[in-house]
Image (cartoon, rainbow, N blue to C red):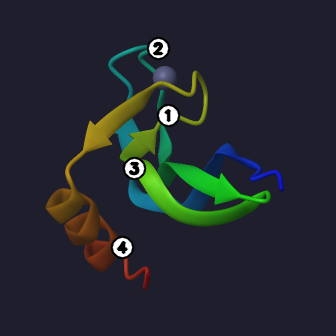
Amino acid sequence: MFIIWGTRPLTKNFGTTSQALTCRHCNNTSYFNIVSHKIWFTLYFIPIFPIEIERKIECPICEYGYSVKKEQFREILKEEGIGV
Ligand SMILES: [Zn+2]
């Protein structure tokens, strides 16, 4: 019997910031995307559990992302009124 396992990246977009931010990378001012990138362990192509989670706010122009910690990320979502 074959056990088929692997990994799969999934990105979830929670919305955008309500305040315009200036990107340190491209210098444009815009509403940043609030996203989480997860690498899932998959079994028979079904995501079982995340093995890596990266939470970011990303510039929508150059897609440069700023990593934020879990607590910070929760705070941002709370401030923006986004439920998880
Ligand atoms: Zn940028």
Structural crowding at the residue carrying mark 4, measured as other residues with C-alpha within 10 Å and reported as few (<14), some (14–19) or many (≥20):
some
User: Is the CB of mark 1 within 8 Å of ligand 1?
Assistant: yes
The kind of residue tagged 4 is Glu
Q: Position of residue 39 (x, y in %)?
A: 53, 46
Q: Is residue 53 visible?
A: yes
Q: Earlier in the sequence, mark 2 or mark 4?
A: 2
Q: CA distance from mark 1 to mark 2?
A: 9 Å
Which residue is the site of mark 2? 26
User: Is the CB of mark 2 within 8 Å of ligand 1?
Assistant: yes
* Residue 59: assigned label: 1
* Residue 80: assigned label: 4
Q: CA distance from mark 4 to mark 1?
A: 17 Å
Check whether the beta carbons of the residues at disc 2 and disc 3 lie within 8 A of each other. Answer: no
46 relative to 19 in the view: left or right: right
Tell me which residue sits at (42%, 58%) in the image.
17
Seen in the picture, residue 26 relative to 15 is either above or below; the reply is: above
Check whether the beta carbons of the residues at disc 3 and disc 4 lie within 8 A of each other. Answer: no
The kind of residue tagged 3 is Ile
Q: CA distance from mark 3 to mark 4?
A: 21 Å
Check whether the beta carbons of the residues at disc 1 and disc 2 lie within 8 A of each other. Answer: yes
Q: Position of residue 59 (x, y in %)?
A: 50, 34
Quarter occupied by residue 48? bottom right
Seen in the picture, residue 9 relative to 50 is either above or below; the reply is: above
